[in-house]
Image (cartoon, helix red, strand yellow):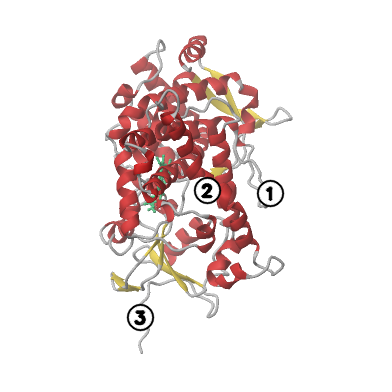
Amino acid sequence: KQKPNYPPGPPADPLVGHLRVIPFENQDATFHAWAKEYGEYRTFLGKALGNHIVVLDSVEAANDLLEKRSAIYSDRPHILVFDMVGMNDIVLMPYGEAFRKHRKFVHSTITKRAITTFQPVQTKNARALALNLLENKNRHEMFFNMQVLYVSSLLTLSDPREFRFATSVITGILYGHQVVSEDDEYMKLMDHQSMIAVNLGQPGGALLDILPFLQHLPAWFPGTGPAIRAREWRPMFRRVYDYPYEQVEKKMVGAEGVAEDSILARVLAKFSTRNSVPEEEIEYVKLATGAMYRAAVETTWSTIAVLFMTMILYPECQKRAQEEIDRVIGSERLPEFEDKDSLPYTTALVHEVLRWHPVIPLAIPHRSVQDDVYKGMFIPKGTTILANVMGMALDEKTYKNPSIFNPSRFLPKPDGDDEPLFGSAFGFGRRICPGRHFALNSLWMLTATILATLDLSVGRDENGNLAPPPLEFNHTVSSRPKEFVCDVRARSRLSASLLSAQAT
Ligand code: HEM
């Protein structure tokens, strides 16, 4: 029997496939190099322990498959250890009836139109963050001083301030909860989420999919660690769905009978009495809102770290955005969403942050549900499809000098290069990020507010020497800049007092 014409790829080991050549760190860089070497269509095949993996390294291939053939390519690979910990929401849900129901709900609550009502939450939190940075200036180095440690005990991964912003904007719209202290339960829940995902996502966790019987063996048996931890952490993981629901429900049936306006409160208001609603319906609402909460924080937080990094490394871009803001808004007031259309460079700067370093560099894997042929290459059913978003960002055919941070690449000629915006940072097809419009708004308001009021520059290390951020990233749940220091100053006395007056 003739071997099918699989996509090309690097030489594989007959037993373990590419397992030994696929690195654990910076996979996107290796995949990008392989795509250039092997893939005429910027796709290539990898194999690990019997599983086929196809990496798509061009926007064209990703659109052709994940978008145009979305009926085939919208499933997710099954990851046993995440299943065991109770990750049952839309993010990893298999493609099917339940997925469609969750997707409809999630997308409808945060459409471009629906989210305009939530803009005040974003504005308020952006101002609070700018003020917080200013007031706690000498503590700023703490904020990136976060290392993920691969141990089984609970470790806090969060810095108080940017993490607080990323949490508070999403809990504000989902649950009407404004984070006001660094000892906030909603922040702790997110800490636990990151800790669980990072620890279970280690290679040991993947072993369970290859040798699933390990989950039934006693704890002393080698390789059973991830299964045991998944079971142990299940109740802690579950709280991300239950806790916010209980809080909002308590407010609605409590003495006052009202909760702050939020996506969840609007849904609960439609339930006439709790007893009349089937349990499955309540579970579905908990999971659908919990999924948005889980997916929003880490991604937004890491993107903010990239924003700070680029503003230090490319001070001329920071200055140009500040000049634009000063010209349009002046220094008597703070930015509002209505200013967005008049601030094209600032908006381009936000898009360039998302392109320059996509924080989910390989998106979330898709999986094919039937055999397919693409440009003569056979892609078998059950193949894991990775969109190499980082590879796409570095495509020289689309982006001139792609490794340089240059917001004006997106501006129309003659001011800029008229290059296309980088939507790939949010994935593709029917699994595209439903929070992308909301995320863009949060990042836009934060960027405009920070640049209107603060100057960011290279910080100093403990010996007093200037310490520019190294171009290094931690690859955990998302890809985030490694620790660096940043000098934060108010641009003027007026900007400081405007913030103090309006941040609360
Ligand atoms: C800068 C911020 C963000 C980035 C870079 C980002 C990126 C992504 C990416 C790459 C995916 C996978 C898409 C795919 O499989 O093709 C995704 C999925 C998802 N995102 Fe986001 N995201 C961000 C913010 C948000 C926010 C604010 C929310 C909620 C309001 C959100 C909710 C989700 C959900 C629910 C999914 C799963 C969708 C599915 O599996 O069908 N994300 N995101």
Which mark lies nearer to you, 2 or 3? 2
Is residue 497 visible to the viewer in this orientation of the structure?
Answer: yes
Q: Mark 1 points at which residue?
A: 153
Marker disc for residue 238: 2
In percent of width and height, residue 226 lies at 61, 61
Provide the secondary structure element on which disc 1 rests: loop
Q: In which quarter of the image is residue 339?
A: top left
Q: Quadrant of residue 225?
A: bottom right
The residue under label 1 is which amino acid type? Ser
Provide the secondary structure element on which disc 2 rests: helix
* Residue 466 sits above or below residue 234 on the image: above
In percent of width and height, residue 170 lies at 44, 35
The residue under label 2 is which amino acid type? Arg
In percent of width and height, residue 243 lies at 51, 39
Q: Give whichever of discs 1 and 3 has the lower sequence position.
A: 3
Give neighbour class at mark 2: few <14, some 14-19, many 20+ (Cα, 10 Å).
some
Single out the residue that lies furthest toward the bottom.
Answer: 1
The residue under label 3 is which amino acid type? Pro
Q: Which residue is drawn at 58% across and 38% down?
A: 188
Q: Mark 3 points at which residue?
A: 4
- Is the residue at mark 3 in contact range of ligand 1, meaning its CB lies under 8 Å from it? no
In percent of width and height, residue 437 lies at 34, 38
Q: Is residue 98 left or right of residue 156?
A: left
Which mark lies nearer to you, 1 or 3? 1
Q: Give whichever of discs 2 and 1 has the lower sequence position.
A: 1
State yes or no: discs 2 and 3 in contact (Cβ < 8 Å). no
Total marks placed: 3
Mark 2 and mark 1: Cα distance apart in space:
18 Å
Question: Which residue is more in the foreground, 116 or 97?
Answer: 97
